[in-house]
Image (cartoon, helix red, strand yellow):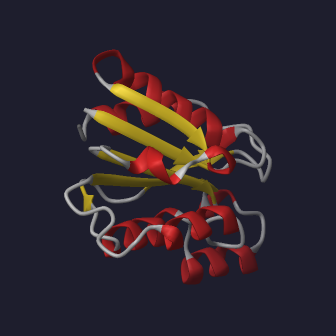
Amino acid sequence: MKALIVYDSYFGNTQKIAETIGNSIAPNNDVTVCMITSIKPEQLSGVNLLIVGSPTRSFKPTDAIKKFLNSIPSNGLKCIDVLAFDTRISAKDANSKVLKVFIKVFGYAAEPIGEKIQKKGGNLIAPPEGFFVQDTEGPLKEGELERAANWVKGRI
């Protein structure tokens, strides 16, 4: 299997999740983990599994991730298994009632990523997943790297 993991990261937390996911499937597969700023369109060629991750910024994926997803042609992911993830602050850890309401109304980045890659023809093999950080800049909550490794292992 040829897998491509594309991510954006502001404080390194999403990068750690992407690398952990890549390492957990790499021993028996051809895996490329790529920061969004380094992605080349030809890297999608021959991919069997595409995983896209973003930090949640203003309740959405980063602009770079949105631009990448929009650049994929219609049905450009046909016959490709896809997964989506984000890094986020848990609603129960939000220290503001207003922020908790906004999270409930607007959500996180993984869901719109999942919707977009499905609209591009991808076969979403699991619901989008969120991995938790302790604060805006992190660090990741304890156990999140292990959870990320188990999440992807249970899907492929």
**Residue nearer the viewer, 125 or 101:** 125
Depth order, front residue of 68/61: 68
In the displayed structure image, the side of residue 133 where residue 82 appears, left or right:
left
Quadrant of the snapshot with the N terminus = top left
Rendered residue at 61%/64% (across/down)? 91
Residue drawn at (26%, 44%), measured in percent from left and top? 48
Image vertical order of residue 87 relative to residue 116, above or below: above
Above or below residue 59? Residue 92 is above
Q: Residue lying farthest left?
A: 79
- Residue 133, given in percent of the width and then of the height, sits at 66, 46
Image x and y of residue 98, in percent: 74, 80
Within the image, what quadrant is residue 155 found in? top left
Quadrant where the image shows the C terminus: top left
Looking at the image, which residue is at 63% across and 38% down?
Answer: 15
How many marks the image carries: the answer is 0
Let me know if residue 86 appears in the view.
no
Q: Examine the rendered structure and indicate whether residue 131 appears above or below residue 27.
A: below
Coordinates of residue 54 in the picture (x, y in percent): 60, 55
Q: Nearer the viewer, residue 98 or 139?
A: 139
Residue 58 x %, y %: 71, 72
